[in-house]
Image: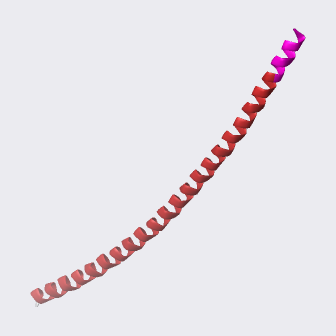
Amino acid sequence: MAGNEVAALYRRIQELENRIEQLRVSRRVLMRLVEKSEAEKWEMVSRLRQEKAQIENRNRRYARAIWEKNKQLVLITSKIGGQLIN
């Protein structure tokens, strides 16, 4: 019986060592996936920040253009109003 118990313990030790090795491999794979995911996330954040900056610049230009057109409209309206009074 003692021989069978020793053999069973050796098999159990071998199984546990195999599981440990599989866990190590799994951990490495998961770490690579996490690193890849983080890199993709930061790439997307960077791209979105650039896009936000571009949109803000376009909005500023558009607001300036509207401001200028509004000034022109007020100037024309005041000239027309002045001509109607005279």
Whether residue 52 appears in magenta in the rendering, the answer is: no
Q: Residue at x 84, y 18 (%)?
A: 7
Q: How many marks?
A: 0
Relative to 58, is 75 above or below? below
Q: Which residues are magenta?
A: 1-10
Q: Quadrant of the C terminus?
A: bottom left
Q: Nearer the viewer, residue 4 or 74?
A: 4
Q: Nearer the viewer, residue 82 or 31?
A: 31
Q: Position of residue 34 (x, y in %)?
A: 61, 48
Q: Residue at x 22, y 81 (%)?
A: 73
* Relative to 78, 48 lies left or right: right
Q: Position of residue 64 (x, y in %)?
A: 35, 78
Classified by dominant secondary structure, the portion drawn in magenta counts as helix
Q: Examine the image and state in which quarter residue 26 appears.
A: top right
Relative to 57, is 14 above or below? above
Q: Residue at x 48, y 67 (%)?
A: 50
* Relative to 8, 61 lies left or right: left
The colour mode here is: secondary structure
Q: Residue at x 66, y 47 (%)?
A: 31
Relative to 12, is 1 above or below? above
Q: Position of residue 30 (x, y in %)?
A: 63, 44
* Relative to 70, 7 lies left or right: right
Residue at the far right in the pictured view: 2
Q: Examine the image and state in which quarter residue 75 appears.
A: bottom left
Q: Examine the image and state in which quarter residue 8 appears.
A: top right
